[in-house]
Image: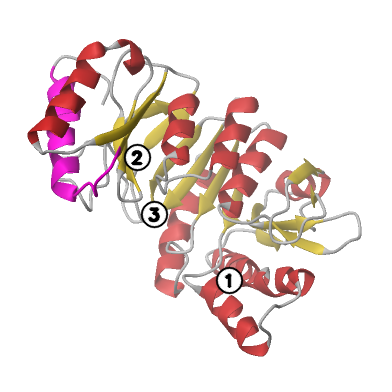
Amino acid sequence: METIVIKFGGSSVADNSKLQLVANKVIKLYDEDNNVVVVVSAQGKKTDQLIKEAEELSLKPDKREMDTLISVGEQISASKLAILLNYLGYQAISLTGWQAGIHTSDENQNAKIEYIDCTRIEQELDEGKIVIITGFQGINDNNDITTLGRGGSDTTAVALAASLKAKQCYIYSDVDGIYSADPNKVEGTRKLTDISYEEMHALSSEGAKVLHDRCVEIGEKYNVPIVTGSTFNNNPGTVISHKLEASGIKSIVKKDVSRVSVIGFGISSRDEIINKILDIANKNSLEIFNIDISRTKISVVFKEIVKDEILQELHEVLVRTWYLYCNVI
């Protein structure tokens, strides 16, 4: 029997009606004869709410106590989902990070997973249960609760998938995959069917709010295929793996107001890409401050603010045109 790890973000578990959608996806995987391990984030803005309340009590809350406080959000999500699944006739159990054997370094609010003792998880799976684990948290050598910082639940899910030798790790949110640009800013974007870990590193480093870089590092190191998709539809998502497609543009991303990066394995060898970027810059009277080139990324820093209209034009010329003769998107 294969093991599947599936993670749901805060928007996916924000209220009881959305928890029902989560339960449906979990049940489908379980009914396909898989061992299912679920990782959940805190509901909606629960973590932000807890931080705000703590800061009303102290200008500089103790980090240890903050970890104890903000870990509560994920516990609420996990226990509520377990309650729902049990009601629907499926054996489920919620485990905190420390009950699940997630051992971390000592740093509060930015701990790193050092190892996972999967004994309890495997015991529950052997009994036929769906195991729901709180993301974002673990325990250090002092038996204190720690949290993993930004992207911590994604990191928890991929680390668990590696430790359990899972077939895949699904990361579900309110977005159904990774796109060739931000769909909120650029028209005509294309969803990627797949992207390599190396290209995903480049996207994350340029500020794309998809997956935290630490999560991608673990997936790459232990060869865990990561599938990003939406909780709210059944559309195919984007698979992140070792697969590389040569010389193709995958995505364009704007970091802050003046840095634009073109992502894709092998693009640094394509002079025509750089030439097209220079043409668009000249056409729009944009002065270039610096160009940084690696084998998966061309980053251009302009001296002026890059408006979304320029991003749209870059996408039209580079991504949509490239797609006609470079089958990578």
Instruction: Return the residue nearer the eye: 285 or 252.
Output: 285
Type of secondary structure dominating the magenta stretch: helix
CA distance separating discs 3 and 1: 17 Å
Amino acid tagged 2: Ile
Q: Residue at x 60, y 33 (%)?
A: 217
| Residue 173 in the image: above or below residue 207 | below
According to the picture, the residue beneath numbered tag 1 turns out to be 80
Magenta region, residue range = 302-324
Secondary structure of the residue carrying tag 3 is loop
Asked if residue 323 is among those painted magenta in the image, a careful observer would answer: yes
CA distance separating discs 3 and 2: 14 Å
| Residue mark closest to the camera, 1 vs 2 | 2
Labels 3 & 2 near each other (Cβ < 8 A): no
The quarter in which the C terminus is drawn is top left
Q: Quadrant of residue 292?
A: top left
Q: Percent position (x, y) of residue 308?
A: 18, 49
Confirm whether residue 164 shows in the render: no
According to the picture, the residue beneath numbered tag 2 turns out to be 178
Asked if residue 310 is among those painted magenta in the image, a careful observer would answer: yes
Q: Percent position (x, y) of residue 204?
A: 46, 40
CA distance separating discs 1 and 2: 29 Å
| Residue mark closest to the camera, 3 vs 2 | 2
Q: Residue at x 61, y 88 (%)?
A: 56
- Left or right side of 271 for 133: right
Amino acid tagged 3: Thr
